[in-house]
């Protein structure tokens, strides 16, 4: 079976299972989502949601973060890990939004990725979730792992994985495909204790077919 055929089968099964999923991060504005995605690096969405639920009651706009001492931001986000670098990026990103974009989160990929702490993954998440715009496939740890296990890619570099997936995943599914693999990774294809025998896509997964 060709990779594109395999991908379409996986999409069909997971679409029936998950429908049209949304980002697991909680937010009320594009800026809140942007900050949440920055915080999600090397951190679970559950932990990020716990942190932002409390933090956004205190500070939730570029203006407020830009004027807040970085040490205070560090205190608010400490439990997300790598908090010093994240705090620095959130403050600088907020300042850039005010200076360049009147405090608004821009839509364009090149404008988003010019912001502190914002790479292609973060930009893809924000563009896909807020505006349903897709310049690529969001590749997080789940997408990286499952794409390799299923047999869609044989790569470890996230940029190369994204390029390969863009060739075989129909563009209309670039946004939802990432959600599907993330949700399946949490439900069945759990890194340390995969439930391969129960997995709905095992018939189309190279790893699952070996069992």
Image: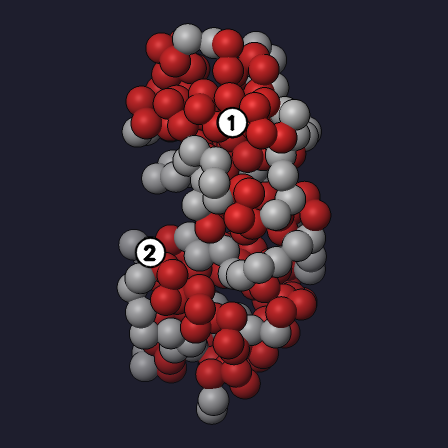
**Which is nearer the N-term, disc 1 or disc 2?**
1
Asked whether residue 40 appears in the rendered view, the answer is no
Helix, strand or loop status at disc 2: loop
- Which quarter of the rendering shows the C terminus? bottom left
In this view of the protein, which residue sits in the foreground, 40 or 86? 86
Q: Residues within 10 Å of mark 1 (few under 14, many from 20)?
A: some
Residue at the (65%, 25%) spot, across then down: 102
Helix, strand or loop status at disc 1: helix
Residue at the (63%, 51%) spot, across then down: 128
Residue 21 locus on image (x, y percent): 65, 53
Residue 152 locus on image (x, y percent): 42, 76
The correct choice, above or below, for 202 with respect to 81 in the image is: below
User: Horizontally, is 96 left or right of 197 in the view?
Assistant: right
Q: Answer with the quarter of the image where residue 171 lies.
A: bottom right
On residue 191, which mark appears?
A: 2
In this view of the protein, which residue sits in the foreground, 198 or 37? 37
Residue at the (32%, 74%) spot, across then down: 154
Residue at the (43%, 33%) spot, across then down: 116
Q: Are marks 1 and 2 in contact (CB under 8 Å)?
A: no
Residue 78 locus on image (x, y percent): 35, 20
Q: Answer with the quarter of the image where residue 207 lies.
A: bottom left
- How many tags in the picture? 2
Residue 182 locus on image (x, y percent): 49, 55
Label 1 vs label 2, nearer the camera: 1
In this view of the protein, which residue sits in the foreground, 180 or 158? 158
In this view of the protein, which residue sits in the foreground, 175 or 105? 105
Q: Marks 1/2: CA distance?
A: 37 Å
On residue 96, which mark appears?
A: 1
């Amino acid at each position: 079976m060709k990779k594109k055929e395999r991908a379409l089968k996986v999409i069909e099964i997971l679409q029936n299972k998950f429908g049209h999923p949304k980002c697991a991060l909680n937010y009320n504005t594009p800026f809140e989502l942007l900050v949440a995605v920055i915080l999600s690096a090397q951190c679970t969405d559950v932990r990020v949601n716990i942190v932002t639920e409390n933090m956004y009651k205190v500070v939730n706009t570029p203006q407020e973060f830009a004027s807040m001492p970085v040490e205070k931001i560090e205190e608010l986000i400490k439990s997300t890990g790598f908090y010093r670098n994240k705090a620095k990026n959130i403050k600088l990103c907020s300042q850039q939004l005010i200076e360049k974009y009147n405090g608004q989160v821009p839509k364009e990929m090149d404008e988003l990725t010019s912001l502190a702490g914002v790479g292609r993954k973060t930009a893809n998440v924000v563009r896909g979730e807020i505006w349903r715009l897709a310049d690529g496939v969001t590749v997080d740890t789940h997408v990286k792992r499952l794409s390799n296990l299923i047999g869609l890619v044989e790569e470890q570099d996230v940029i190369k994985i994204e390029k390969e997936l863009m060739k075989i995943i129909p563009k209309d599914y670039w946004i939802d495909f990432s959600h599907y693999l993330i949700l399946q990774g949490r439900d069945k294809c759990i890194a340390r204790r995969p439930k391969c025998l129960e997995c709905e896509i095992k018939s189309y997964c190279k790893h699952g077919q070996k069992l």
